[in-house]
Amino acid sequence: MLRLVTGHWELKIIAVLAAFTLWFFVATSPHSQAGAATGSATVVPQVHGTPASGYAVQRVLVEPPNVRITGPRSTIETRGEVSTFPVDVSGRRRTVIESVGLLLPASTYLIHERTVRVTVEIGEDGMAEPQGAHAAPKKGTSR
């Protein structure tokens, strides 16, 4: 047993020195978590495309509305919002509900959520003329 502990001591010293050197470079690198911060950011949903003719986006909801992120202190302190990946509503006539990821700044990570739920409510456009409707007759004329 003693031979196992005392044998190849040169290799053991080299291994300890290599481990210490690696630890030193990781701990002092600019990407180290030593300057890290955690903060809250508002989620801004991105909606692309246009619904079908006669329909419009009525409302856009996102759940959760805020997420906790961690990363370099300088980024966290200056970044109050994160955007979602786009939700496409091209040609849609009904509400769209999608689970989408977030577009995060470099070296920034989410603490809990990996995705958010975006609901794009689509309804008939109140500005569009209903089908079959005709213009009102002009004053003083009959139909």
Image (cartoon, rainbow, N blue to C red):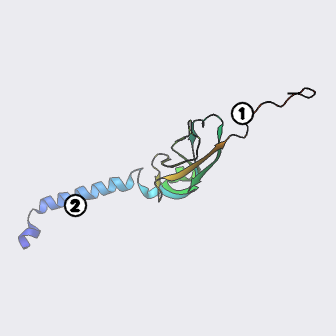
Instruction: Give the quarter of the figure containing the N terminus.
Output: bottom left
Seen in the picture, residue 115 relative to 57 is either above or below; the reply is below
Q: Position of residue 74 (x, y in %)?
A: 53, 50
Please state if 113 lies on the left or on the right of 131 as rendered. left
Q: Residue at x 44, y 58 (%)?
A: 34
Residue that badge 2 annotates: 16
Label 2, residues with CA under 10 Å away: few <14, some 14-19, many ≥20: few
Q: Residue furthest top?
A: 141
Residue 102 x %, y %: 50, 48
Q: Position of residue 42 (x, y in %)?
A: 59, 53
Residue closer to the observer: 129 or 34? 129
What x and y, as percent, mark residue 139? 91, 29
For the residue pair 47 and 35, the one nearer the viewer reads as 47
Q: Nearer the viewer, residue 56 or 67?
A: 56
Mark yes or no: residue 118 visible.
Answer: yes
Q: Residue at x 6, y 70 (%)?
A: 3
- The residue at the point 58 percent across, 44 percent down is 94
Can you tell which mark lies on residue 132? Answer: 1
Residue 79 in view (yes/no): no
Judged from the image, the secondary structure of the residue bearing numbered disc 2 is helix
Looking at the picture, does residue 60 appear above or below residue 51? Answer: below
Q: Is residue 57 left or right of residue 75?
A: right
Q: What residue appears at the point 66 percent right and 36 percent down from the top-left corner? A: 54
